[in-house]
Amino acid sequence: MTFEGIDKILNSLTRQEGWDDYQHYRQIILCWQKSVSPRLLHKTRVVSLSRGVVSIATAGAALAQDLTLQRSSLIKRLNACLEKPVTDIRFSSAQWQEKAAENSSRPPIPDSTGPTVDPQLPTPVSGSGFDRWRQRIHQRSLTWSSCPECQAPTPERELQRWNRCSLCWSRSTR
């Protein structure tokens, strides 16, 4: 058995079929990290490259839809950084769970707005429809009375109808 120098080993590796594809994929990952905000970077992950189409896993379906609407500007930002341009980007939350399963041993972290939040669950993009809806419901719930059973903010009509919140009422009817 003969030993070869590291330079010979690296040269033989870089000449193998598929090495250029790997290098392009690696470059896409680095450019994606430069092209998006740090907040968005924690909620996305480059998954694959096939025939010039980049697949990116997102932390949630709403985020995938939001990014799909921004696809053309994201492609422009990515291609400005790449030697070999990509033709399209596809966003999906389907492969995000693989990463969540790896980190499932991490406990939820407290959030200053109230209950504990699992860091693996998607959070809404600032200014999204969900975020605006959540803020509206939160503001509305500040004026609601509390459910006598669970102390949760409850609309007055539910208290008038069932003398408790709808969740406590549904539990009592089972």
Image (cartoon, helix red, strand yellow):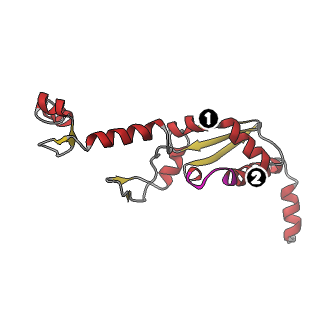
**Alpha carbon distance from label 1 to label 2:** 21 Å
- In the image, what residue type sits under mark 2? Gln
Q: Secondary structure at mark 1?
A: helix
Query: Residue at left 47%, top 43%?
Result: 124
Residue 161 image position (x, y, % from top left): 13, 27
Labelled disc at residue 172: none
Q: Which residue is located at x 52 percent, y 45 percent? A: 59
Mark 2 nearby-residue class (10 Å; few <14, some 14–19, many ≥20) = some
Q: Is residue 134 left or right of residue 16?
A: left
Residue 166 visible in the picture: yes
Q: Which quadrant would the N terminus be assigned to in this image?
A: bottom right
What's drawn in magenta, residue-wise? 33-39
Residue sitting at the far top: 161
Rendering coords of residue 121 (x, y %) = 44, 47
According to the picture, the residue beneath numbered tag 1 turns out to be 68
Query: Is residue 35 a member of the stretch shown in magenta?
Result: yes
Mark 2 falls on what kind of element?
helix
Q: Residues within 10 Å of mark 1 (few under 14, many from 20)?
A: some
Comparing 25 with 4, the one in front is: 25
Which residue is the site of mark 2? 27
Q: Determine whether 19 is above or below 68 in the image.
A: below
The amino acid marked with disc number 1 is Thr
Of mark 1 and mark 2, the one earlier in the sequence is 2
Between 1 and 62, the one lying in front of the other is 62
Q: Is residue 126 left or right of residue 49?
A: left
